[in-house]
């Protein structure tokens, strides 16, 4: 390297030589590099003096490469092409370093948003983009880095890290119970206004499942409020319109804040868990790994429970 520095004092001289050799014109090279024609001529002359050979044959109104110049041009242009490709590749990777996280609207509103400030404070260099959806997206084809899904963790082609076990409370606003008899046992819920979630794309537990696990015979007669977005279900419960499903990891902060309360202690638990998933065939970027690990660290439910 020291020998190279001895002969080539400035990388700019190589740029000048390459442009001049490509155009066979000092003037065109100068225009391309936004310098003067004498500057290009002097840069080439310094290289020739350092190498001790003539690289260009200078004739009246014409410029051609000598045999040494042609060999030098081949090597210089080859090296610069690879440097340019490396710069473009690194630059593109840097531009694409954002992390897209696909979650439900409810998860975004009630789990992510309250924690985003702390995440951004500890990870100011991570460009996290939260994308909400009401379906399980095809992560690979939709250029999504990570997604939160409910299931058994077995999705072919994906890796999965458990976040929270599925547990569902019956929740309502404190105001809903102000003038009503609070339910003491699961069967008491039958006399209350139940808010139903009707997912259009993904199978989810229903009140039929909740009551069955708690030993209550219940037939859904199609009555009560029915909403197809869980964020709307939560908002409706907060508004005091009835008792709704409260997935523990989503509503626990609302319960801690007193915005919602558990109507009773009984709950529904399944063998499913919420996972953060990503394509098996794609290596996660360091930023995506940090987001994934942050999600896992923030999951307050014991996933082994």
Image (cartoon, rainbow, N blue to C red):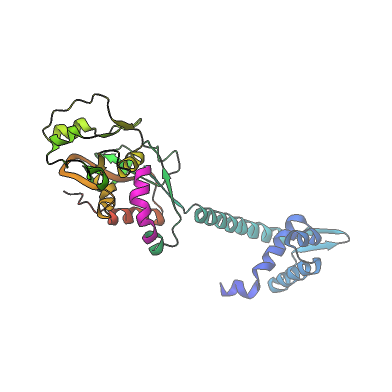
Quarter that holds the N terminus: bottom right
Magenta run includes residue 116? yes
> Which residue shows up at 46% across the image and 53% down it?
98
30 w.r.t. 203: above or below: below
Q: Residue 29: x and y, percent?
A: 76, 60
Does 246 sit above or below residue 128?
above
In the depicted structure, whether residue 230 falls above or below residue 255? above
Residue nearer the viewer, 261 or 127: 261
| Residue 200 location (% of width, % of height) | 35, 30
Check the image and name the residue furthest to the top: 221
The answer to whether one can see residue 296 in this image is: yes
Left or right? Give the position of 56 relative to 130. right
**Which residue appears at 23% of the width and 48% of the height?**
261
Horizontal and vertical percent position of residue 303:
21, 49
- Depth check, front residue: 154 or 207: 207
Measuring from the top left, give residue 193's x and y in whole percent: 24, 34
Q: Main secondary structure of the magenta part?
A: helix
In magenta, the rendered stretch is 105-118
Residue at 33%, 50% in the rendered image? 111
Q: Nearer the viewer, residue 2 or 252?
A: 252
Magenta stretch holds residue 249: no
- Whether residue 173 is visible here, answered yes or no, is no
């Amino acid at each position: 390297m020291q020998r190279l520095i001895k002969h080539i004092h400035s990388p700019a001289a190589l740029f000048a030589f390459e442009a001049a050799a490509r155009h066979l014109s000092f003037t065109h090279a100068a225009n391309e590099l936004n310098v003067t024609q004498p500057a290009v001529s002097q840069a080439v002359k310094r290289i020739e003096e350092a190498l001790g050979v003539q690289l260009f044959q200078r004739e009246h109104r014409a410029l051609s490469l000598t045999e040494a110049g042609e060999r030098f041009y081949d090597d210089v242009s080859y090296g610069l092409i690879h440097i340019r490709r490396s710069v473009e590749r690194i630059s593109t990777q840097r531009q694409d370093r954002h992390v897209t996280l696909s979650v439900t609207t409810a998860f975004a509103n009630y789990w992510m948003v309250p924690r985003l400030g702390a995440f951004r404070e500890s990870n100011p260099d991570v460009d996290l983009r939260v994308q909400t959806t009401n379906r399980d997206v095809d992560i690979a084809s939709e250029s999504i880095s990570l997604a939160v899904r409910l299931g058994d963790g077995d999705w072919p082609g994906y890796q999965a890290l458990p976040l929270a076990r599925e547990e569902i409370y019956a929740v309502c606003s404190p105001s809903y119970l102000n003038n009503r008899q609070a339910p003491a046992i699961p069967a008491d819920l039958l006399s209350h206004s139940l808010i139903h979630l009707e997912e259009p794309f993904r199978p989810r537990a229903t009140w039929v499942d909740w009551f069955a696990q708690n030993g209550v015979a219940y037939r859904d007669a199609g009555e009560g409020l029915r909403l197809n977005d869980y964020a709307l279900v939560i908002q409706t419960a907060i508004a005091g319109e009835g008792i709704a499903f409260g997935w523990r990891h989503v509503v626990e902060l609302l319960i801690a804040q007193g915005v919602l309360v558990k109507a009773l202690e009984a709950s529904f638990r399944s063998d499913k868990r919420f996972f953060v998933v990503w394509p098996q065939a794609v290596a996660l970027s360091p930023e995506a790994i940090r987001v994934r690990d942050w999600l896992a660290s923030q999951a307050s439910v014991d996933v082994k429970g």
